[in-house]
Amino acid sequence: MKKIRKATKEDMKSIYMMGFDVWGDNMSSEKYIAICQESSKYQKGTWYTLEDLHTKELLSSLIVYELSPSKDIIVKGLGSIATPLQFRKKGHASLLVKEVINELEQKESCNHFFLYSDIGADFYSKLGFMEIPYEKQKYKESVCMYYSQSYDVDSISFEIPNYF
């Protein structure tokens, strides 16, 4: 059995290490954790985890950012989606993304979600995300993607967020 929950301070070293093999850039794990701990980007959002209730291991994590361009529109950004190497390709990140979106839709009436994919669009397309049209993309290295049950990507009336 698995549980989605907001991360605690005690979770943070484990969360940071989930992406170490991808984002660690040949540095030591100690240096990588220190950089993550000092990151203002990582301190701005709310971290969520997927936990195995039997083993208490963290299976996947992501961070949610407030991107609301006005008081009337609730917009969230999902970032730093990561799963430890040994737990990848088992659906953990997909489950976490779906459940966090569902929670934010229900509890906060949020119906606009963005993410920047560094792994291409296919993975997130399977979760219902759509690529922002090419002419509105802001970066060559990352694909900006959008998710909403209520709106379509062409009806977005606010500026596409910068990388978060």
Image (cartoon, rainbow, N blue to C red):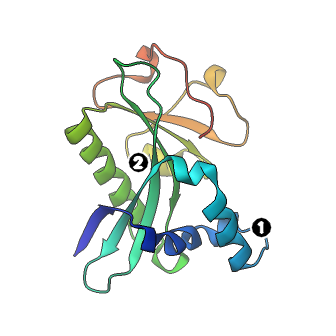
Above or below, 112 against 136 in this view is below
Label placed on residue 25: 1
Q: Which of 39 and 19 is in front in this view?
A: 39
Can see residue 89?
no
Q: Which amino acid does label 2 sit on?
A: Lys
The residue drawn where x is 57% and y is 35% is 144
In 3D space, how far apart are the residues under numbered discs 1 and 2 (Cα atoms)?
Answer: 29 Å
Secondary structure of residue under mark 1: loop
Above or below, 114 against 7 in this view is above
**Residue 129 located left or right of residue 17:** left
**Residue 123 located left or right of residue 71:** right
**Residue 33 located left or right of residue 52:** right
Counting from the top left corner in percent of width and height, residue 133 is at: 57, 24
Above or below, 103 against 30 in this view is above
Q: Could you tell me which quadrant the C terminus lies in? A: top right
Front label number (1 vs 2): 1
Counting from the top left corner in percent of width and height, residue 10 is at: 44, 74
Residue carrying label 2: 126
Q: Which mark is first along the chain, 2 or 1?
A: 1
Q: Residue 20: which quarter of the image? A: bottom right
Q: What residue type is labelled 1?
A: Asp
Counting from the top left corner in percent of width and height, residue 8 is at: 39, 67
